[in-house]
Image: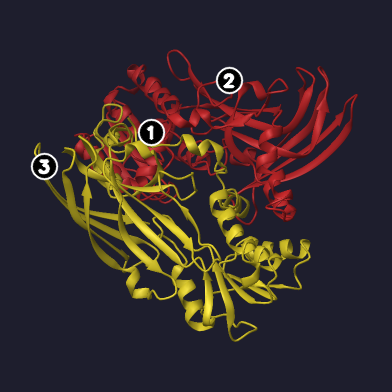
Chain colours: A red, B yellow
Amino acid sequence: MSGVNNKQEEATSKDYYFDSYAHFGIEMLKDKVRTLSYRKAIYQNEHLFKDKVVLDVGCGTGILSMFAAKAGARLVIGVDMSDIIDQAKIIVKDNHMDNKIILLKGKMEDIVLPVDKVDIIISEWMGYFLLYESMLDTVLIARDRYLKKDGLIFPDKATMYLAAIEDGEYKDEKINFWDNVYEFNMSHIKEIALREPLVDVVEAKALVTKPVILKKIDIYTVKKEELSFTVPFKLVSLRDDYIHAFISWFDIEFTACHKSIHFSTSPFAQYTHWKQTVFYLRDTLTINNGETVEGELSCSPNEKNPRDLNIKINYTFNGECMKSKGNLDYKMC
Amino acid sequence: MSGVNNKQEEATSKDYYFDSYAHFGIEMLKDKVRTLSYRKAIYQNEHLFKDKVVLDVGCGTGILSMFAAKAGARLVIGVDMSDIIDQAKIIVKDNHMDNKIILLKGKMEDIVLPVDKVDIIISEWMGYFLLYESMLDTVLIARDRYLKKDGLIFPDKATMYLAAIEDGEYKDEKINFWDNVYEFNMSHIKEIALREPLVDVVEAKALVTKPVILKKIDIYTVKKEELSFTVPFKLVSLRDDYIHAFISWFDIEFTACHKSIHFSTSPFAQYTHWKQTVFYLRDTLTINNGETVEGELSCSPNEKNPRDLNIKINYTFNGECMKSKGNLDYKMC
């Protein structure tokens, strides 16, 4: 059984090689779980948006700004530092919404908004492993500077999960591959590969343990410092199996809605472009039903390059078949 | 029928998001059509390699250098300007070949080789559409500066092909998608998307015309200036169908071998990581069996950024069902 596969990806658009606006935009926009969740959260809550001033942090092609304008917002301000905002300006005009939507190019820290405060912040800020190259920092700056007391944030809750998977076949392909490359030993590269989390689709049946919550983030109250964290975990095995990797994913909630809306990037839910994040272990754990793997995961921006993420996982396993300890440094960069 | 799909890709490794050495290396090395063709060309020709001095241009992980050393070369010099060569040095040492293989980091233009001349140049220099981000320029510099009279080049022939395909379903997904994005008009992005060649797997059955040769390149004699070119083409339809795109691919030959070895990146051949390159047309052509599309394709490095490729395709179609002219500017960047 291979836990990680890409069957579900066949339905998605990811084959532009060129890292262009068109490519970037299409992958995000074609992620219907993502885009329809935002649309639903906005369209089903016209009573919240009517005549309000809305700030769209990292507006990209402007789709969320247009959702908000269509839902009745008086003014939508979209901010993005990427060149894609030049295209978004044309799109907004083509859709006759330039009387309601203002797009500003630049960093949230530097930009001057045409209003003192906003009623609602909308943002699709989530990265791989939730926090990799995420724009959450920017959302927090916008929140602290511009959001009215009792203003709303869409979405406002994020929850990160951890579990362990059986993934022998894929680990052989991705990691052990380097042991014998056309009869040469490239195990030096294997060490590099092991430290790189893999973003890929994991099949639900690959999960050997129950998932546990790693971290809950409340966007109304979280502080930037809290995005560096160390959390303990305890994973309980659901069967006799092997463990080759830990995986992580996240759920997102819009609790400001009349009826809370949420979506999940879990292996049990529909495919999203965030897939899951896989952390291979050096050793394979032989685990019995009911046995536990305990440890802690820490996550923090790299000191030299804050866009990179350092993730450390320590674990201890004292099983009937074997005992093992691991101390793994991963880097998403 | 959808011409472009990614079914064949399932067998390949391309799901690292992080653009790392490990990822880069694995995609190339796991391309067995590529790597086994080089290995065959080298291992089956030990009589050519025995006691020779070999230069590996753009040696990457060092795999071709190790093939050449194992085939009996006296000295192999690998050159690469990427940091990956630091890993290659360790790999070569791990394989006890550091007495035969010297790896030099830097640009071919700047580097000082420990020999005046080499007997054989080996290089895997090919990019998408053969010439995009290719290292052929560097191979030509190495050839002119270091190759002995009557020295050998592996490979030494490249042939580029052109054909036209039916690809309605995928064009809708990739291009026409922008006409209506969650009920908004993003056709402005469509114009950008149309100008971006798409690197993807094309099914053989999607071909509506016979392929024609666009360009033959002889690595022994080609000059850098000849890599900017304008060539006429005439494509003859094999059936009544629609044409949504032109596609291009290339074949590679090692004619210095005792028995010529070649591989193809055509839709009729086994999957390679080069896939095919697709150029969508603005219009759909309704073509009958035996009718022709005539035109010319020109290709040249972008003046401002020579790593980018400008590709222009002009065509004229005078069919029974319709007449159409097109003048398309594509950019690979």
Could you tell me the amino acid type at mark 3?
Gly
Q: CA distance from mark 3 to mark 2?
A: 52 Å
User: At 77% across and 27% down in the image, what residue appears?
Assistant: A242
> Do the residues bearing badges 2 and 1 touch, measured as CB atoms within 8 Å?
no
The residue lying furthest to the bottom in this view is: B116
Q: Is residue B316 left or right of residue B265?
A: left
Task: Give the labeled residue for mark 3.
Answer: B319
In the displayed structure, B304 sits above or below B9; it is: below
Q: Position of residue B302 (x, y in %)?
A: 32, 65
Say which element carries label 2.
Answer: loop
Say which element carries label 1.
Answer: helix
Could you tell me the amino acid type at mark 1?
Leu
In the displayed structure, A227 sits above or below B90; it is: above
User: At 10% across and 36% down in the image, what residue appears?
Assistant: B321
Task: Give the labeled residue for mark 2.
Answer: A268
Which quadrant of the view contains residue A16?
top left
